[in-house]
Image (cartoon, rainbow, N blue to C red):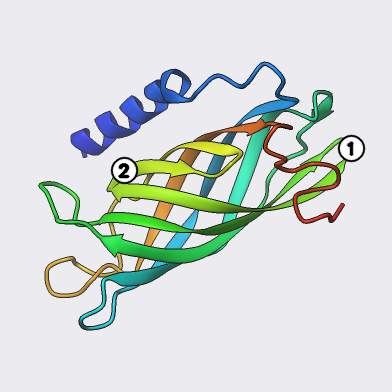
Amino acid sequence: MKRLLALLTGLAAALPIVALAPPADALGVAGCTIGGTISFTPPAAGAKQGGWRIERGAINCVGSYKSTDRFLGQGPFTGSGSYEMLPSGPGSCIYQVGTGKVDYVIRTTAGTYNISEKSDFVLAGAGKFATPSLRGTFLVPPPYEGDCATTPVTRASFASQVLLVRDPQIGVATGAGADGQH
């Protein structure tokens, strides 16, 4: 438990240092927390890739969006994709590298934005999470559904701290939202 607490404290302290500063022309910057449950479908016999899915997560941001818009509380966060198991090391039994797509809703004083982005992650109990506009760390602490020894992990809770940067140069979340809904 002390090791988990130290890891969480270290992740929380490192986020402001590790997270890249926003580009000079960024129109919005916010600190966000994301949490929920992630489900894993283990690779089929002989296959290298399995699947992951987040069905009922939540994102909550504090800061500004499009320069003057303020965030108005949490919104839903979902996603899905594939992962590949990495060779295990000491400590956590979940060693993965994955890719996929996340969908999330942010509510601001100017409206609601539905955003859909490609995502990548590296996970070894704690990990790195990135989309074009979200960058940060996440943690998948025990207990898991699955024991890693006789059955694979199929479900776990996760918590993430990310920096949201809206960068007009890459066209993320422009106008009414990345998918055009407002």
- For the N terminus, the image quarter is top left
Q: Earlier in the sequence, mark 1 or mark 2?
A: 1
- Which residue position is annotated with label 2? 126
Q: Identify the image quadrant of residue 67.
A: top right
Residue situated in front as seen by the camera: 38 or 86: 86
Circle 2: residue type: Ala
Question: Total label count?
Answer: 2
Q: Residue 153 in the image: x percent, y percent?
A: 27, 67
Q: Residue at x 87, y 43 (%)?
A: 111
Circle 1: residue type: Ala
Q: Residue at x 33, y 54 (%)?
A: 97
Left or right of 40? Residue 164 is right
Residue 96 shows in this picture: yes
Q: Residue 81 in the image: x percent, y percent?
A: 47, 65
Q: Residue 38 in the image: x percent, y percent?
A: 44, 62
- The answer to whether the residues at label 1 and label 2 have Cβ atoms under 8 Å apart is no
Label 1 to label 2, Cα distance in Å? Answer: 35 Å
- Which residue position is annotated with label 1? 110
Query: Mark on residue 139?
Result: none
Density class for disc 1 (Cα within 10 Å; few <14, some 14-19, many ≥20) is some
